[in-house]
Image (spheres, coloured by chain):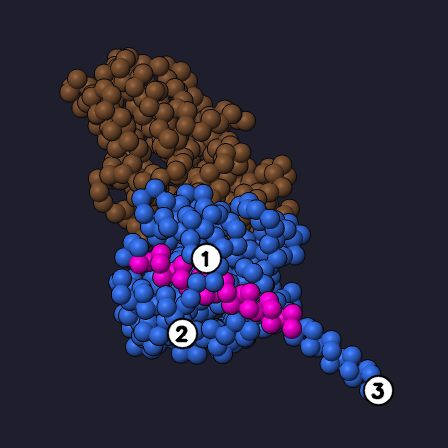
Chain colours: A blue, B brown
Amino acid sequence: MYSQKIEITFGAFNNRHLQMAKLDELQDIVTQTRRDILRMVHKVNSGHPGGSLGCTEFMVALYNEIMDLKEGFDMDGIGEDLFFLSNGHISPVFYSVLARKGYFPVEELSTFRLINSRLQGHPTTHEGLPGVRIASGSLGQGMSVALGAAQAKKLNGDDHLVFSLHGDGELQEGQNWEAIMYAAGNGIDNLISTVDRNGKQIDGPTSEVLPMGDIAEKFRAFGWDVLEIENGNDLEEVIAGLNEAKSRTGKGKPVGIIMNTEMGNGVDFMMHTHAWHGKAPNDEQLEKALAQNPETLGDY
Amino acid sequence: MKKYTDQGKNDTRSGYGAAMTELGRSHPNVVALCADLVASLKIQDFIDENPDRFFQTGIAEANMMGMAAGLTIGGKIPFASTFANFATGRVYDQIRQSIAYSGKNVKICASHAGITLGEDGATHQILEDIGMMKMLPGMTVINPCDYNQTKAATLAIADYVGPVYLRFGRPKVANFTPVDQKFEIGKGLLLNEGTDVTIIATGHLVWEALKAAESLEEQGISAEVLNIHTIKPLDEEAVLKSVKKTGCVVSAEEHNYLGGLGESIARTLAVHYPAPQEFVATQDTFGESGTPADLMEKYGLNNKAIEKAVLKVMKRK
């Protein structure tokens, strides 16, 4: 009995140790991604740092831990998981995560929003940037696209998953509710849609601009299987939530995640306000913000 | 004048439905979507034979267009169909961002276009759709003229890679183009050779143009009739070749003169070969309820209107 217990403890310790090493590695990517975001928007004095910083843990976890991805990039993505960014304005975090994953050279992040760049203000397939499968920016369209891609996977006998990310303010667009209704009504159970609930949008708190009530209950009422991530800026919690969501796929219902995040997370003066939704830091602010996120993998 | 015979009146939407049935058998990657208008779009046979390849979206056109874009990711060729009004104006931004700008291989197939939708009235009679669709970069815009041509066009766009807007209609009209014709996207069809005037027509107005040309021949006027089924890309070569010969042109379409085929022709002429042009089209107005024939008469969209425009434009030469 005694030895068995030791073995179990030892095994658990090893597992925990490995997890910690992996978590450290992911945390390094998170910190570097935050630096990338800040430097990208600072350089062109435009772009959307707030939501990007809030979704950094989610995006890093998704691409580096959760999704099953093939080497390289092709548009059809058969035999791999797919991701669609519906709230395209958080392109800085998307671009940094794609570049750090190896979809394109990290040096290219320096071309963000500049003329002749593949890194447009909002993501697009038009310039052929690897990793991007749909244009987004005009809000509310991404879930429909994800649904179509999920249906194509079923037709192709491809048992991989489709992920999508949406802003909470974005849910004010009616097309989302068409898609939410369709997904439940048709049992699209290879889809995991995450709502970034940061409670903020351009004009202020969502509760003031247009109160949306209980988002999770609304998804449930439409027929979704919904789980919540209490702290979407805690890497371990995000990974656990996404793994839990994966385990609920294939059971006849679309899976929704309501993920609480803090807009501007990782930079103290950018948090607890909607002011940094679409505003870039000046030189002094950048310096302060970068000091809170020390270089880990090397700046581009 | 070359004689054209009506092989039996039929609706262009049935040409679409017949082609979809064929595509269901010949093209495993073709899928269909519809927003609660299956019977109107004549695609029940496709659905019966390929239930897994049909997506009923309900009355939710925005979601339908987004899903169509998503289905291309994985190699499907989606044919998304509904009434022209709901397939364009209602979902312009979805088409613009998720389909056109994203370069997706989606076929937007729109029935009940134009004023000949008839009794339902102006809420459903879209006369602005060609303009909206042709302004989108990369969008191909096709408006076939009868059952046979609609069927051929539907088959052709399945093998073309890129977004397409295919526009057809509700009423039963003359079916006069050849059965099993080959359809070449972007290629005008010279239906009748003439020397005095060029009539360039699209959609339901092509048959009216032929009737007008017959009547004009009796008056001693030799009218060339060019069928432009593909409004974008426009067969500029065919347009210029004909107008250089006749020296004047009448464009004829079931659409507002703003944004339609006529404007595309006018641009081509302005750049390459300025010539007098008259427009048989609706005059920046909404439609109303009525029979298709009564509406075409009232809004100046029939053979008589074309004849009148020909006499006017020839005086301007």
Chain letter of the residue beneath label 3 in the structure image: A
Let me know if residue B38 appears in the view.
no
Chain letter of the residue beneath label 2 in the structure image: A
Instruction: Rate crowding at label 3 as few (under 14), some (14 to 19) or many (20 or more) other CA atoms within 10 Å.
Output: few
Q: Which residue is mark 3?
A: A1
Q: Position of residue A160 (x, y in %)?
A: 63, 57
Q: Earlier in the sequence, mark 1 or mark 2?
A: 2
Mark 3 or 1, closer to the camera: 1
Magenta range is: A17-42
Instruction: Rate crowding at label 2 as few (under 14), some (14 to 19) or many (20 or more) other CA atoms within 10 Å.
Output: many
Q: Position of residue B291 (x, y in %)?
A: 34, 44
Chain letter of the residue beneath label 1 in the structure image: A
- The one of B147 and A53 positioned closer to us in this rendering: A53
Q: Position of residue B259 (x, y in %)?
A: 27, 38
Q: Earlier in the sequence, mark 3 or mark 2?
A: 3
Q: Amino acid at mark 1?
A: Gly
Reply above or below: B313 against B298.
above
- Horizontally, residue B312 falls left or right of residue B23, namely left
Q: Quadrant of residue B6?
A: top left
Q: Amino acid at mark 3?
A: Met
Which SS class for mark 3?
Answer: loop
Instruction: Rate crowding at label 1 as few (under 14), some (14 to 19) or many (20 or more) other CA atoms within 10 Å.
Output: few
- Horizontally, residue B41 falls left or right of residue A277, namely right
